[in-house]
Amino acid sequence: MDALKRRSLEKYTTRAEPLFKLVGLVAVLGAFVPDHAVYLMVVPAVGITIYLTIYSYVEYRRVTT
């Protein structure tokens, strides 16, 4: 893996780590609100996953072009 791709992966990891921690915190809070637990657990996780997939693709394209 060359240096540019490694840098792209490091940027992705740096961005993803706090977001997934936040999603985990929101999911735990969902346990205390049973009426909305599914929404508090699933929606943030799916949203962050979609965001990070797009971010990763854009960052990869930036490095490879």
Image (cartoon, helix red, strand yellow):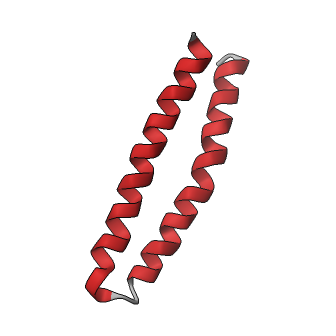
Q: Vertically, is 28 above or below 18?
A: below
Residue 36: percent from the left, percent from the top? 30, 81
Q: Dividing the image into 4 quarters, which one contains the C terminus?
A: top right
Q: Residue at x 62, y 47 (%)?
A: 15
Which residue occupies the foreground of this view, 51 or 28? 51
Q: Residue at x 44, y 38 (%)?
A: 53
Q: Vertically, is 40 above or below 42?
A: below
Q: Residue at x 49, y 69 (%)?
A: 24
- Residue 35 in the figure: left or right of residue 64: left
- Residue 13 in the figure: left or right of residue 40: right
Residue 1 lies in quadrant? top right
Residue 44: percent from the left, percent from the top? 40, 62
- Residue 55 in the figure: left or right of residue 39: right
Q: Number of callouts in the render?
A: 0
Q: Vertically, is 48 above or below 65?
A: below
Q: Vertically, is 26 above or below 47?
A: below
Q: Residue at x 55, y 23 (%)?
A: 60
- Residue 43 in the figure: left or right of residue 65: left
Residue ranking furthest to the top: 65
